[in-house]
Image (cartoon, rainbow, N blue to C red):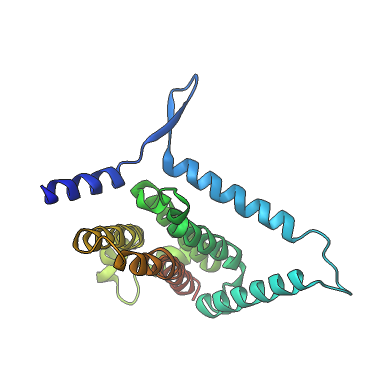
Amino acid sequence: MVTSEFAEEIRHELNCQTVFTIPGVNIGVKESIVVSWIIIAVVVLLCMLLVRNLSVDKPGKVQLLMESCVEALNNMLAGMVGPHATEYIPFLATVLIYIGIANIIGIFGFKPPTKDLNVTVGLSVMSICLIELAGIRKKGFGGWLKAFTEPIAIITPINILELVIRPLSLCMRLFGNVLGAFVVMKLIEFVLPVGLPVVFSLYFDFFDGFIQAYVFVFLTSLFISEAVE
């Protein structure tokens, strides 16, 4: 009985419901998309509010705090991606903020978009496209193709296979860790419904959520750094 209830909860958690259908074209908009729109709207609104009344001569406390945060974020990402690919920092920062918020938004009653495999696939494909385009931009199309034959031509099929393996690994790592955290939390709730789940919820909802965002961006940065070498 417990096993069937547990399996049903997992199925319900993985089932991304359609919130509404776009009239005329009959396209269903999933819950993960709507929550992503909410995250985007909140981040854009905060950016608009925080950049109001900026001053060079007399910066306020909020401005100084934001400048310190932006500088720390830029320094962290610059250390990841290396000196030859700093132009990709805005993209990496955006992905880091989105995934970080998406992973912890469950505490506000929303289903995290990263529990939808379609979202993690989209993020992974977008990152891999950027990685390959960075390589083409740096080496040229001919140099990018030639890189598949390095260090020796015989491993060309393996290098080509990486085009599939990399987005798959990024996608499944993010999706699997988020889903794994949910499964562990449900197991803890079955064993001890009171007290202990609150402690572990703080870990999985905050610390682990940001760690997964960091890992995704770190791997993307590593691949970009390799592509532009």
Observer able to see residue 149: yes
Of residues 146 and 220, the one nearer the viewer is 220
Residue pictured at 49% horizontal, 41% vertical: 34
Residue pictured at 43% horizontal, 44% vertical: 32
Of residues 111 and 146, the one nearer the viewer is 111
Q: From this viewpoint, which residue is outermost toward the right?
A: 57
- 157 displayed left or right of 71: left
- 11 displayed left or right of 57: left
- Residue 61: x and y in percent read 77, 73
Residue pictured at 51% horizontal, 60% vertical: 95
8 in relation to 141, above or below: above
Observer able to see residue 141: no
Q: From this viewpoint, which residue is outermost toward the front?
A: 194
- Residue 89: x and y in percent read 58, 68
- Residue 116: x and y in percent read 36, 48
Task: Give the image quarter of residue 172.
Answer: bottom left
Of residues 144 and 90, the one nearer the viewer is 90
